[in-house]
Amino acid sequence: MTLDLTVSGTLILPEGRLENAWLGISGGKIVSIGTGPAPDATESYDAGSDLIIPGVVDGQTHATSYGGLPGLRSTTRSAIAGGVTTIVDMPYDNPAPLNTVARLEDKVAAIREHAHANVALYGTIMPGQSTTDIQPLIDNGVVAFKISTFESSPTRFPRIASEQILATFNALAETTIPLGVHNEDQEIVRAHIAAAKAAGRDGIAAHSESRPPAAELAATAQFLELGAAAHAHAHIVHLTTARGFQLVDNYLADGFRATGELCVHYLWFDPDKDGAELGAKMKVNPPIRPGQIDALWEEILAGRVAFVSSDHSSWPVDNKLTPSIFDAGAGVPGLETLLPAFYTAADNRGLDAAAITVEQLCERPAKFFGLWPNKGALRIGADGDLAILSYVPQVWDSSRAHDELNWSPFDGREFNVTVTRTYLGGNLAWDGSKVVNQPGSGRYVQRGQSHWFE
């Protein structure tokens, strides 16, 4: 049988690194893996000694928070250029969130029209919304739900009260679906922001102090306890301190379903070191904390981090150019930098960067969102979603990015690797210089049977 495609190089497999190897793809699936000369194929590519890894599953993106559903086009184009073959998109779409089947159908239609990469979806609920609306969204494939304990917008990103959080947990308790949370205590944050403004403090140094760890940890602890009361899966979508992950681990040790996620920018930036240069360009919520990078790496190595994501935000840079830090938008672009940034950070610490990158960016999010074993690993039967990493270093220049945003806190940072090819379902999607697949090449990916606690 002649294969559709063979790709040769250094494969990063679940069982380890395999050099001078190849994999074969037919019908969009990996059908064979071996060493030595590659078999006959309609198309073949030899990556030499470069790394061949599964396509990245970015477990937290905000593709449509600014440009609406058409924002999926530029976001997924950027994903493909960064070796990300599946994004898991948050529900806070502009102008209204994904909280009903009708809104889900609209977003799925937009995926079919615009997406260059595969897209899995979070759902949400609005204040006062009936829990009977939850199961239909699950039946139609959402991979998780997300709510917030802090209100950024009363219509698009509202605060959900404690009694409704508990009711939602109760509705999800008999399922494998996680409920994620934006974890900040509203009263603490608003009081601290008011105090900072009154003192005339409006720079990036005031941002972390105005949203202190106490606000993040208080919201985290309450959310975990509500999840434990319902025996449901409580997920913290971004933790910024080692204590946060250890708090989650305490609930896990007590037999409850609890997980915590980390975003790559928390592993790169420190307001004490980078704040003067970046200012609002490094503003995210919860804030990047001073002096936390080493401690967060220890949490990864201890196994207490579920996975690492980009938390890609689609804000234009004008949203950051405000006189006060408190008026600037929170969030940073991150889809094209997630893979090289995480790999480089691990490599610079002397870790097995290839192995830990595949674990944190591919395998673990695929399992978490029910996409395993089709995604997240180079294995026979898996989807032919691949990224090829060259050892050619690069200095990041966001003016060449594919997200239509063209700004980044990573500008001028050196990465140890470059994404030279991306394949989606066995088809070339990124050739190292341009995205070559078409809008609509990506598909809506529904949750399967795998789950984190199986």
Image: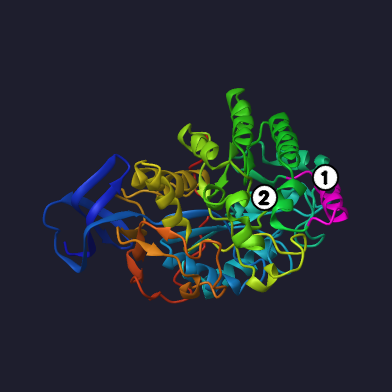
Q: Nearer the viewer, residue 428 or 326?
A: 326
Above or below, 429 against 349 in this view is below
* Amino acid residing under circle 2: Pro
Which label sits in the foreground, 2 or 1? Answer: 2
Q: Which residue occupies 62% across, 22% down? A: 254
Q: Which residues are magenta?
A: 184-201
If you read the primary sequence from the N terminus, does the residue marked by circle 2 or circle 1 appear first? 1
Q: Position of residue 278 (x, y in %)?
A: 61, 61
Q: In this rendering, would 386 be left or right of 243?
A: left
Q: Is residue 370 above or below residue 24?
A: above
Which secondary structure lies at badge 1?
A: loop
Q: Residue at x 53, y 75 (%)?
A: 113
Question: Is residue 375 visible to us here?
Answer: no
Residue pointed to by mark 2: 287
Is the stretch drawn in magenta largely helix, strand or loop? helix
Is disc 2 in contact with disc 1, using a CB cutoff of under 8 Å?
A: no
Q: Position of residue 217 (x, y in %)?
A: 71, 37
**Which dot marks residue 161?**
1
Residue at 68% x, 46% y is: 181
Residue 65 x/y as whole percent: 66, 66
Say if 174 sits above or below 6 in the image.
above
SS under mark 2: loop
Q: Residues within 10 Å of mark 1 (few under 14, many from 20)?
A: some
Of 88 and 2, nearer the camera is 88
Mark 2 neighbour density, 10 Å: few (under 14) some (14–19) many (20 or more): many
Amino acid type of the residue tagged 1 in the rendering: Ala
Location of residue 256 (image quadrant) = top right
Figure quadrant of the N terminus: bottom left
